[in-house]
Amino acid sequence: MIHLATLAQGQIYSQFYDKLVPVTGVPWLLFTILKMLVVFTVIMVGVAMLTLAERKISAWIQDRIGPNRTGYGGLLQPAADGLKNIMKEETYPDAANMKLFILAPMLSFIPALITFAVIPFASPLSTKWGLVEMSVANLPIGFLYILAIASLGVYGVVLAGWSSNNKYSLLGGLRSSAQMVSYEISMGMAAVAVLLLSGNVSLQAIVSQQQAMGWNIFPLLIGFFIFCVAAFAETNRLPFDLPEAESELIAGYHTEYSAMKFSMFFIAEYSNMVTASALMVTLFFGGWDIPGTQWDNIPPWTVLKFLITGAVFFGKLLSFIFVFMWVRWTLPRFRYDQLMSLGWKFMLPLALCYIVITGGAVLGLDMLGVSRSVQWFGIAPFWAALGVLNLVLAALVFVVLDRGRIISPAYSRLSARQVAHLRAISAGRSLVAPQGD
Amino acid sequence: MNTLVYTFHFYLFGLIAIASALAFVTRKSAVAAALWLVNTMFCLSALFVMLDAQFVAAVQVLVYAGAIMVVFLFVVMLLNLGEASEVTDIRSLGGKLTAGFVGLLMLAELFSLSRLKFPRLMGAMTDHANVVNPVSAPLFHEFLLPFEVTSVVLLVAVIGAVVLAKRGPKAQ
């Protein structure tokens, strides 16, 4: 049955895309270079504007005005900051491992920028040379590519922490690697549910599956919850910004960096945020799909359609980035033990259980012959059935998660068992210490 | 033209892979060695892409780069910040000669093995829209039992590691 479902998805996919000949040869090369330039420019300029947006939003949340001196309403502030960072003197710590110290910002910067390459950001465009896909590289392994490249970002952070030869940097780097390794697993596991539904790892196939059946946010609500939390941890944003916790570690792994090298870590963080938002849009919110209409899903692929779907995609993307910023200026930071117990004792078991439940539900619904295509009132029965299941699961999960059952809140008293555990640890230490027996 | 591009990239990635592998075994600093190993894995992944095995390429980076991350953590935590020149394993000329001899032996084995014909488990890639299916279908149909047994063996190893770590200071 799974095979049949996969086949059906393939047909939906080919029905949308195989009718027109994709662009080949020299025009393909030119279009690819053009797309690379455009995406790179949009991300770099976008990241610069996002730093301004962060300061403006934080000011708005804290009832301040924010930067408003440079340019109209502070619009030129990012340019001023960039210029300052380039002109500023670079400092190199004496005891640092110089090769790795210089390599680390690059290792952080490059993966952050190249992950966006596989994300489809608009409907394809029909030109006189053929059909142009609107992602820089429409890789058949799309989602796995993103997971693979995103897992490399942690090298930059760890190497920066290690090569600086500074205890705060080292602690920041170690925290970051522990955090990213833990939450990466939950992130991948949460996305497996999406792959079960689409039957393919190509991001374009995931988008067309959602166009045919409805957005994944409703039938995979828990998956989205896990993915979203893990994405916050992966991007080192609050409430998971322990790697650079300024109140404990000065600035964590980039304490020793100045000028443009510091700026590269900064750009990497913001472009990671852009990619994480784009992934959430693509996996759970239909990518460039416009809700409530089929007009955008079928040929002809005109310029108007390309512009509108692109605007819709970036609108969704920006709303997720706003959520990232909103959360940053609202929630306090997790304690380290809370972070770890959330990752390993809650998110990972939940994600694993969710794969089993979703797999069983998809198999069962396919066996019962529940239709995946839109039937009554523009709703697919398959979509609605999975969605109801997820609402029930969500109610259960949030009842269990509530009131400090899993993560102990900072104000809670220690239980007798925890006190005994801590005493046992300190008793064990005294055995190791010289004055012990 | 196409073959030329293919050959060029094959030798490019192949040579970088060999050079990185040599650097990996000759570096004295453990961090540098681990980084060269990452580079080797990348080049192997590029070679897999050229063989049209894109899924294997992605998994190569995902799994191996992720696993090397753990090696990194050991290096950073256990050899904390010290210059790693004392931890090198190659101490004498005899050790170096033995290593070279074993290397030659393995090279000879590789050459003799390459003359054999191995059975092809997978057909050539035909469906470029779905790259996971050719790997997953045999894994979960024909070879389900070996696959499950392998996972149980891995699980046993994990549980064993946890049990050893849990014993704590009392056992010492």
Image: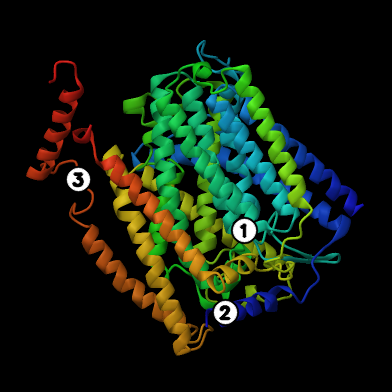
Q: Nearer the viewer, residue A279 or A123?
A: A279
User: Which residue corresponds to mark 3?
Assistant: A409
| Structural crowding at the residue carrying mark 1, measured as other residues with C-alpha within 10 Å and reported as few (<14), some (14–19) or many (≥20) | many
Lower position in the chain sequence, tag 2 or tag 3: 2
Residue A200 showing in the rendered view: yes
In the figure, is residue A142 to the left or right of A94?
Answer: right
When the figure is inspected, residue B101 is found, relative to residue B164, above or below; the finding is above
Q: Position of residue B94 (x, y in %)?
A: 62, 20
User: Which residue corresponds to mark 1?
Assistant: A142
Q: Position of residue B58 (x, y in %)?
A: 61, 53
Lower position in the chain sequence, tag 3 or tag 1: 1
Q: Position of residue A66 (x, y in %)?
A: 43, 34
User: Which residue corresponds to mark 2?
Assistant: A3
When the figure is inspected, residue B129 is found, relative to residue A382, above or below; the finding is above
Q: Nearer the viewer, mark 1 or mark 2?
A: 2
Lower position in the chain sequence, tag 1 or tag 2: 2
Mark 3 chain: A
Query: Marks 3 and 1: same chain?
Result: yes
Q: Amino acid at mark 1?
A: Gly
When the figure is inspected, residue A366 is found, relative to residue A87, above or below; the finding is below
Residue A81 showing in the rendered view: no
Q: Amino acid at mark 2?
A: His
In the figure, is residue A196 to the left or right of B92?
Answer: left
> For residue B48, which numbered disc appears in the image?
none
